[in-house]
Image (spheres, coloured by chain):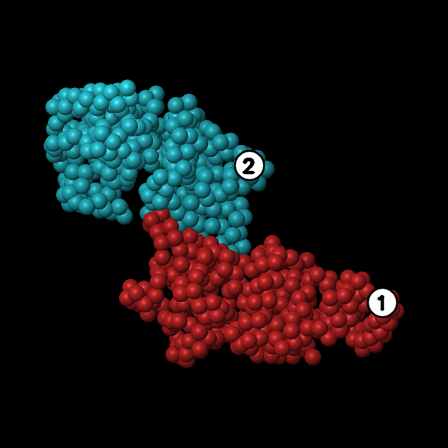
Chain colours: A red, B cyan
Amino acid sequence: MANLSQKLTRLLRGQLNLKLQRFNSTGCKLIYCEHGDPVKVIRKETETIPDPAKDEVLIKMLAAPVNPADINTIQGKYPVRPPLPAVAGNEGVGEVVSVGSGVTDFQQGDRVVPLVSALGTWRTHCILPKNNLLKVPKKLGLVEAATLSVNPCTAYRMLRDFVDLKPGDTVIQNGANSACGQNVIQICRAWGLRSVNVIRDRAGVNELRCFLKDLGATHVLTEEELRKTQIFKNGELDKPKLALNCVGGQNALEVMRHLQKGGTMVTYGGMSREPVTAPTSALIFKDVRIRGFWMTEWSKQNADSIDRFEMLEELISMMTSNELQGPAFKMVNFEQYKEALMNTMTIKGMIGKKYILEFS
Amino acid sequence: MANLSQKLTRLLRGQLNLKLQRFNSTGCKLIYCEHGDPVKVIRKETETIPDPAKDEVLIKMLAAPVNPADINTIQGKYPVRPPLPAVAGNEGVGEVVSVGSGVTDFQQGDRVVPLVSALGTWRTHCILPKNNLLKVPKKLGLVEAATLSVNPCTAYRMLRDFVDLKPGDTVIQNGANSACGQNVIQICRAWGLRSVNVIRDRAGVNELRCFLKDLGATHVLTEEELRKTQIFKNGELDKPKLALNCVGGQNALEVMRHLQKGGTMVTYGGMSREPVTAPTSALIFKDVRIRGFWMTEWSKQNADSIDRFEMLEELISMMTSNELQGPAFKMVNFEQYKEALMNTMTIKGMIGKKYILEFS
């Protein structure tokens, strides 16, 4: 009986594959053959989509973001350098079209997120080993799914892996309006942590302040306000145990000053292009600890770890219960990739909109 | 019988105390009533030496070093600020003169090292709770005993507490000719670690190179040589897991560049008066970790820990077996403290001689 059922399933799947393959036998991908200006070196290419092999899954991509790190990778300025020619893109969400004969965990129509970095997600179709995919619920928003594996995970790990934080503890961060910063604010709220969020003074700063407070920020301070703040002196908040830095330079130093004894600053970006500077006295007498975090490396080291799947499960649950919302975004068709590339490179807005490529 | 023996001991001790007290009833100490230039604010004062109370020990100081941190403490520039007026001095070695009735672990003639920081060791006599003293063997050199609790301990802990080092691993340090640096070299040799020692180019650099190599340095490099060195590229040495920094600024940055992925730089001094600067990429992509170490704080946190006594025992054993030699020094009589202060403040030599006050 089981045998018969298996045979029928295989037969049915075979027919579906055949049908879909006929329908989708040609796909498109955005590739680059040399490093350089993304607008110049990226080009669209068609490709024939084969059937998935035994342990593989054929996916029709639904959405894939254009992240700053994708730009840097294409420019050859990122430590990850896929062999050329390479398909661009690092994140995304797709739908299972068909599966190989050895795949039982996925079926047609499942929504999946690839879990390998630098895979090349800017393509209409991709074939992936079954172990490199995470099935996500359909109630998870498309944008949330497409941008799940970098920013929310970075925020989650930085809040979890460096310092033992308990509800009521304070976290301070600069660049609080960054995509990752917005995740930090929301995860802090969900976990009962107080967040002090530092932003640059700018036109419309109060609008930004309101936006971040709505996300759950305990305090939003400009750099100038941070210098004069009394919130750590008047007993309102404990000094932060953890500081998250994506700016560097003088701004990072001002943030570091507020850390409590033995506190840690974790750097995950350097928007000012200035290094992180630590006063000798802070290192020796305050035992301030300076670290860095890179999600790509963590994911590589923890590819099959329980920690990773627990994290993804918790993040998805936070997203589907609306505790954690995806980034502000603009969805553009795959064909308009140049607009997405140019806008990601010149991002200057208050809350940079993430460009998401749509493949339908 | 035991009772009689105890009574006799007590009686005898009492007589000795009486005799010694009569002999030494007046002592001298170097005190300061305000912070400022040590040569100006330090003055000698006589004091009456009482009998030790039940759990106390009366010590006749034999030798006490003048450390740069002592100078900074007197100047009010150090985070440790004993209440004024204060007796200066932080380290030393003494001999037990008499003990209180509750003291059984020490007896007259024992050589002891005080284990509390900022105690005030620049005095002919001091009375200390028995728990604040470490008995050291008489075969331990006087200079080694007097300078046991800061530099050798700092070197030991930095080599032990930050990174898991195994024989054959590499440690890199700058300011390698400092008092602590010399300890680092010798402990590395004793533990089978390779040490790469960075020094400033200077007149007589080859003499210094020989001196440090004789102590056990694997390599001694000037800053210029460090920039061009092939020792980590030609496979001779693994890249360092640990870097020790007492200089800061550009020098620390050059040293940091050689750390292996995940390596740690520990700062314990800042001779250049420049902060420690870490490139954002080193933090994120190389997972370089920046820490600081302060022996005073460690000793406070680990006052009665097994770790502390194991460390002291191991260091003393290394010293008595000549694996670890004390610093180059100049012994001066207590009365000539001004010479010691002035020379410690203007230390410029190749291997700064440590001034040791002698009380006999």
Residue B200, above or below A287: above
Quarter holding the C terminus of chain B is top left
- When asked about the image quadrant of residue A99, the answer is bottom right
Residue B233, above or below A238: above
* Circle nearer the viewer, 1 or 2: 1
The spot of residue A46 in percent (x, y) is: 75, 72
Label 1 SS = helix
Going 52% across and 48% down the picture, which residue do you hit? B262
Mark 2 neighbour class, 10 Å CA radius: few under 14, some 14 to 19, many 20 or more = some
Q: What residue type is labelled 2?
A: Leu
Query: As rendered, which of B65 and A192 lies closer to the eye?
Result: A192
Going 42% across and 48% down the picture, which residue do you hit? B291
The spot of residue B300 in percent (x, y) is: 33, 43
Residue position marked by numbered label 2 in the rendering = B237
Name the side, left or right, on which A323 lies relative to B360: right
The spot of residue A96 in percent (x, y) is: 73, 72
Going 58% across and 59% down the picture, which residue do you hit? A307
Query: As rendered, which of B47 and B129 lies closer to the eye?
Result: B129
Query: As rendered, which of A316 and B131 lies closer to the eye?
Result: B131
- When asked about the image quadrant of residue A212, the answer is bottom left
Residue B155 in view, yes or no: no
Quarter holding the N terminus of chain B is top left
Residue position marked by numbered label 1 in the rendering = A2
Q: Distance between the residues labelled 1 and 2?
A: 61 Å
**Same subunit under labels 1 and 2?**
no
Name the side, left or right, on which A274 lies relative to B55: right
The spot of residue A17 in percent (x, y) is: 82, 73
